[in-house]
Amino acid sequence: MVFTYQIEIQTNGFCDIHDITSRVNKAIEVSGIGSGLVCVFVNGSTAGITTCEYESGLVQDLKDLFEKIIPRDKPYHHDKAWGDGNGFSHVRSSLLGPGITIPFSEGRLLLGMWQQVILIDFDNRPRKRTVIVQVIGE
């Protein structure tokens, strides 16, 4: 069985990080599927999905990392093509990736004790993000 669920999130851009673990668990609960895989995917080319220990120090470390390896104040070819100034956002998103797949059993994600599912919005402006959650299993 496949069940599709959407999560809407208002973000601030500029490496805005949101813990969406409880919302992904809610999708599994609503699906009625006991075990299987859940695919979590953000549609858009300036955001990404991953897991981490969601705590303020690591959240800041991630922001610092992306700024160090893909700084926003450098010129990007994308900016020349479109003039929207968010070339860094696209590069960051491409590096992180738009989604992940996580196993679940007995209606709960099989994450590590300190592991949460996060959405990172890299764009240079606030956005309304849609995260697609597909629950696959039995």
Image (cartoon, rainbow, N blue to C red):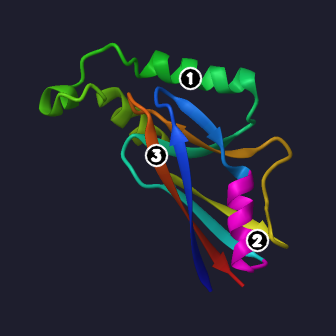
What is the quadrant of residue 75 in the picture? top left
Residue type at tag 2: Glu
**x 63%, y 77%: residue:** 136
Q: Where 101 sits versus 44, above or below? A: below
- Residue 84, x across and y down, in percent: 23, 29
Q: Where 105 sits versus 63, above or below? A: below
Q: Which residues are magenta?
A: 22-34
- In the rendered image, the quadrant that contains the N terminus is bottom right
Q: Nearest to the eye among marks 1 and 3: give it.
A: 3
Q: Earlier in the sequence, mark 3 or mark 2?
A: 2
**x 40%, y 17%: residue:** 71
Counting other residues with Cα less than 10 Å from the Cα at mark 2, is it few (<14), some (14-19), or many (20 or more)?
Answer: some
> Observer-nearest residue: 127 or 24?
127
Residue 25, magenta (yes or no): yes
Q: Mostly what secondary structure, the magenta segment?
A: helix
Query: Is residue 40 found left or right of 55 in the rendered image?
Result: left
- Badge 3 marks a residue whose secondary structure is strand
Q: Which residue is mark 1?
A: 63
What is the quadrant of residue 102 in the picture? bottom right
Q: Earlier in the sequence, mark 2 or mark 1?
A: 2
- In the rendered image, the quadrant that contains the C terminus is bottom right
Q: Which residue is mark 3?
A: 128
Query: Is residue 79 found left or right of 114 in the rendered image?
Result: left
Residue 29 disc label: 2
User: Residue 98: in sight, yes or no?
Assistant: no
Residue type at tag 3: Lys
Residue 98, magenta (yes or no): no
Q: Nearest to the eye among marks 2 and 1: give it.
A: 2
